[in-house]
Amino acid sequence: MSPTMLNTPVPPRHRRRSRFALLATVAALVAGALAWPAADRAEAAPATFTHPGVTVSRGQLDFARQQVNAGAQPWKGAYDQMLASKYGSLTRTPKPRAVVECGSYSNPNNGCTDEREDAIAAYTQALAWYVTRDARYAKKAIELMDAWSATIRDHTNSNAPLQTGWAGSSWPKAAEIIKYTYDGGWANSGRFATMLRTVYLPEIINGSNSNGNWELSMMEAAVGISVFLEDKTSYDKAMAKFRTRTAAFVYLSSDGALPKTVPSQNLDTAQKIINYWQGQSTFVNGLTQETCRDLTHTGYGISAISHVAETSRIQGQDLYGTDVGERLRHALGFQAKYQLGEAPPGWLCGGSLNLGLGPITEVGHNALSNRLGHVMTNTDRLTQQNRPSGSNNLFVAWETLTHGDNPS
């Protein structure tokens, strides 16, 4: 059976018979689907790291600043939205904890929301500093980062790796802007770096065998932290895991009959792979491992892919021209059309999808459509519809401002 046959929607009356035929026929193909060339995983850290260089570059920041100060849209509206948010308040008081305890779906929630939101607030204040050159914003970002670096010692409970990844994705974005653009000094930047190295990096660097959005978010944090720490070993390790997980999260027809897998998960039969993909047995370009769970968690994974690709580009290696970019392009387009309202066919997740993709399209849309010229009709429509995009209150924030139609 060819991959094309596996990707053809199955009429309802034949679906059960075809499912059994699939399991029987492709079992012998699983070993091939599991194979992953080592050369594809290897990503070398840059000889010299570029700063600021986590998700947003100095050139991108300069463009955003120019547009806001000129009153140009959508950037001025995006900036105003950011500053009016709870994250943009100069009276915000940090709420650090020595131990942040997060269970499944943040239950219990002992510092989980506080940590994530203080990290987003630090990034928000850093962006406000860059746009306005008002030192009050830089000092507020420093206050937030210093409060946590003086206090936190650990993350516990079942969601600790994911929580660490979410908060750890925002902290280095803030720190990069402040350390490399604010000339007022940051006395405790070394302590902040120690926090990232000793509290955050060990929790995330070895990855996760949970749903794909976990490891992708964790590797986003690990890559960003590695840039701030200028840690080439951790950068290479995180990037290798990212490449493997991205290929196992977004399906391309070139993968063959079945999606690629992460070897450590031992998904060594067709049935195990189908179960892991939420029971989905028909595979098409852009389908993700969590599409049939919901588009919200799918969006977390897609966002992390775009953020790592953007950081890698800033650091000198453009992953958008590799399978990472191809998977990202198809994932955005596939999810966007259903988020826009197209009814899912019966072969896709039983004909029902849980929507809620979130504000996650700007980075990938700008890189793939605006810069590389790919036609991305659905992604473009959704991006325009969602402008100005805000924050998902976890690890995504203000990407119309930083990446919307940004040529830098």
Image (cartoon, helix red, strand yellow):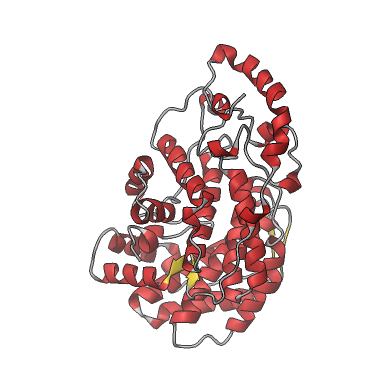
Residue at the image point whose x is 35% and y is 44% from the top: 375
- x and y, in percent, of residue 309 in the image: 51, 58
Position of residue 193 relative to residue 78, above or below, is: below
Position of residue 300 relative to residue 228, above or below, is: above
Q: Quadrant of the C terminus?
A: bottom left
Q: Is residue 95 visible?
A: no
Residue at the image point whose x is 50% and y is 71% from the top: 174
Position of residue 23 relative to residue 51, above or below, is: above
Determine whether, in the image, residue 65 is placed left or right of residue 28: left
Q: Quadrant of the N terminus?
A: top right
- x and y, in percent, of residue 125 in the image: 44, 72
- x and y, in percent, of residue 176 in the image: 50, 75
Residue at the image point whose x is 53% and y is 59% from the top: 308
In this rendered view, identify the residue nearer to me: 291 or 81.
291
Q: Is residue 309 visible?
A: yes
- x and y, in percent, of residue 243 in the image: 60, 54
Quadrant of residue 78 within the rendered picture: bottom left
Determine whether, in the image, residue 379 is placed left or right of residue 69: right
Residue at the image point whose x is 59% and y is 84% from the top: 188
In this rendered view, identify the residue nearer to me: 111 or 179.
179
Position of residue 15 relative to residue 146, above or below, is: above
Determine whether, in the image, residue 72 is placed left or right of residue 187: left
Determine whether, in the image, residue 74 is placed left or right of residue 285: left
Count all numbered tags in the image, as a single digit. Answer: 0
In this rendered view, identify the residue nearer to me: 28 or 216.
28
